[in-house]
Image (cartoon, rainbow, N blue to C red):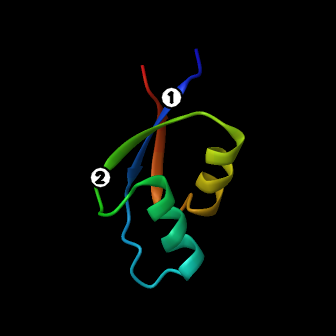
Amino acid sequence: MTPRLEITQARSAIGEKEGARRTLGALGLRRTGQTVSHDDSPTVRGMLRRVAHLVAVKEAK
């Protein structure tokens, strides 16, 4: 079973570059405080690296 990651948008995307805003959208995050769950994969890890300053990540139980 693949581990899951819970990703919460901690900061607003206002003033961020287009790439960071699109990455948040691709992760399914639309507003501050929203949480989504994704499988832990290299693709998702790369997306998280790009928006690390905007999100909080923890492993789901």
What residue appears at the point 29 percent right and 52 percent down from the top-left corner? 34
Task: Pick whichever of labels 1 and 2 is earlier in the sequence.
Answer: 1
Q: Amino acid at mark 2?
A: Gln
User: On the picture, is 16 further left or further right than 49?
Assistant: left
**Residue on which the image places disc 2:** 34
The local crowd at label 2, few if under 14, some if 14 to 19, many if 20 or more residues have their Cα within 10 Å, is few
* Residue at 28%, 54% in the rendered image: 33
Residue 12 in the image, given as x and y percentages of width and height: 36, 71
Could you say which quadrant of the image residue 39 lies in? Answer: top right
The answer to whether 20 is drawn above or below residue 43 in the figure is below
Residue bearing mark 1 = 4
Q: Quadrant of residue 37?
A: top left
For residue 30, above or below residue 4: below
Q: Amino acid at mark 1?
A: Arg
Secondary structure, mark 1, is strand
Label 1 Cα neighbours within 10 Å, binned few <14 / some 14-19 / many ≥20: some
Relative to the observer, which residue lies in front, 55 or 41?
A: 41
For the N terminus, the quadrant is: top right
The spot of residue 54 in percent (x, y) is 47, 62
* 13 left or right of 45 in image: left
Where is residue 49? Give x, y as percent.
Answer: 65, 55
Rounded to the nearest angstrom, the CA distance separating label 1 from label 2 is 16 Å
**Count of marks overlaid on the render:** 2
Residue appearing at x 68%, y 52% in the figure: 46
Check if mark 1's residue and mark 2's residue have beta carbons within 8 Å: no
Residue at 50%, 59% in the rendered image: 26
Query: In terms of depth relative to the viewer, which is nearer, 43 or 6?
Result: 43
